[in-house]
Image (cartoon, grey):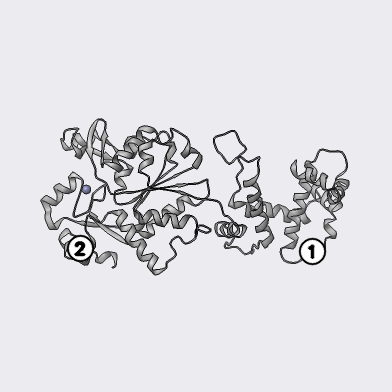
Amino acid sequence: MPYTELPRTLGALKNSDFAAKLSPDRTLKEELRSNLICKLERGDTLFPGVMGYEDTVVPQVVNAVLSRHNFILLGLRGQAKTRLARMLTRLLDDQIPYVAGCEIRDHPLRPICRQCRDKIAAMGDETPINWLKADDRYVEKLATPDVTIADMIGDIDPIKAARAGQDISNELTIHYGLVPRANRCLFVLNELPDLAGKVQVGLFNIMQEGDVQIKGYPVRLPLDVMLVFTANPEDYTARGKIITPLKDRIGSEIRTHYPLTVDHGIAITRQEAWTRRQSPVAMEIPPYIHEVVEHIAFLARDDKRIDKKSGKESCETRLFITSLEPAPKTILDAVRSHWGIENSLHWTLDVIFDEDRCKTRKDNSPLGLAIIRHAAFNILKADKTKGSLRRKRIRACIDTAFRSNLFAA
Ligand SMILES: [Zn+2]
């Protein structure tokens, strides 16, 4: 139904086709579950653009949603955890009604905040209704040690109390935090172990009991939220990082992973790298470059010198999607050096690498070769052993041990 034709008052809403779907007993998790079942029956792609998880991560996410669990995605950086979480909004209803003006988007038939209950008591069927789109029902927060209960749950607002002439303990004086504002929405909390213990307790209370203490005043807020957490597996399993009662309330633990095959890796990098752009010069990356980039990533992940456990003393190496994307300056420099000023680089490339006699002229090959030549030049130049560049270049061709040393250096 077009947005402008949706019912705008409580009375109109009750008499509309939406009424059947509107039971306040249909919680957010119930909504996700029923929409997921529809999608599964239709055979829809649940997470378009997420590759290589079809048989590992996606079935676990499906199970978690079907089981109405809050869940945690455990994995390292760049494993599409947040992307997966964000795509859960695809399982929401297109739009849902809420009491207009309500900070926590109350359900029109069962409002939990005092303002809405008072409003409906006063205005009845004339109470105005607003609509919330699926995309807007997503709240994300990066947990850091300085996040407080006030940020997450709320705080007493003395100014609000003074203006309304209310007692400070009155629930009308609460300034809501992120979790209440995520009522009837997906709430994604990244890097959960970084959250202070006290805030975790608050979070647990609101998940479990629907109530929480703000500055010592008990506040009852039976919120309807779906919580999705993300964490690094090492932080998560470390003792004391997550309070046990909260851990027990997380229904499913789902481990993500890096691509299992080079083909998946290539497909993901191709999708994420910004290589198809509006430009008079077409950029074409030969398939073997894609393979080289991906193989380096695979080798690096298995390399003993790269510690997979974070937090320990380690050499952390990041390979970015942008590795595939040479900066315009790099390309320009490579091109310029080809016919530019007679600088030493050009001279070396010319004399030692016989660049000018190179017969490769077609398409992208000269650029590709130039890049490889420059790489070779830099590697040779970095070598501190005795001998001329020309000699080293020949030696690198015939002496395997020498070549390995060059790469290791
Ligand atoms: Zn309300």
Q: Residues within 10 Å of mark 1 (few under 14, many from 20)?
A: few
Q: Residue at x 17, y 38 (%)?
A: 164
State the image coordinates of residue 145 (x, y, percent, origin top left): 42, 34
**Is mark 1 in CB contact (under 8 Å) with mark 2?**
no
**Three-letter amino acid code at disc 2?**
Ala
Question: Relative to the observer, which residue lies in front, 209 or 169?
Answer: 209
Label 1: which secondary element: loop
Residue 325 visible to an observer of this rendering: no
Q: Is residue 25 visible?
A: yes
Q: Given the current orientation, which residue lies at the most extreme top position?
A: 216
285 to the left or right of 32: right
Residue drawn where x is 80% and y is 51% of the image = 346
Q: CA distance from mark 1 to mark 2?
A: 71 Å
Question: Which residue carries the number 1 mark?
Answer: 360
Query: Which residue in the structure is indicated by mark 2?
Result: 19
As drawn, is 217 to the left or to the right of 260?
A: left
Give residue 282's quadrant in the image: bottom right
Q: Nearer the viewer, residue 370 or 300?
A: 300
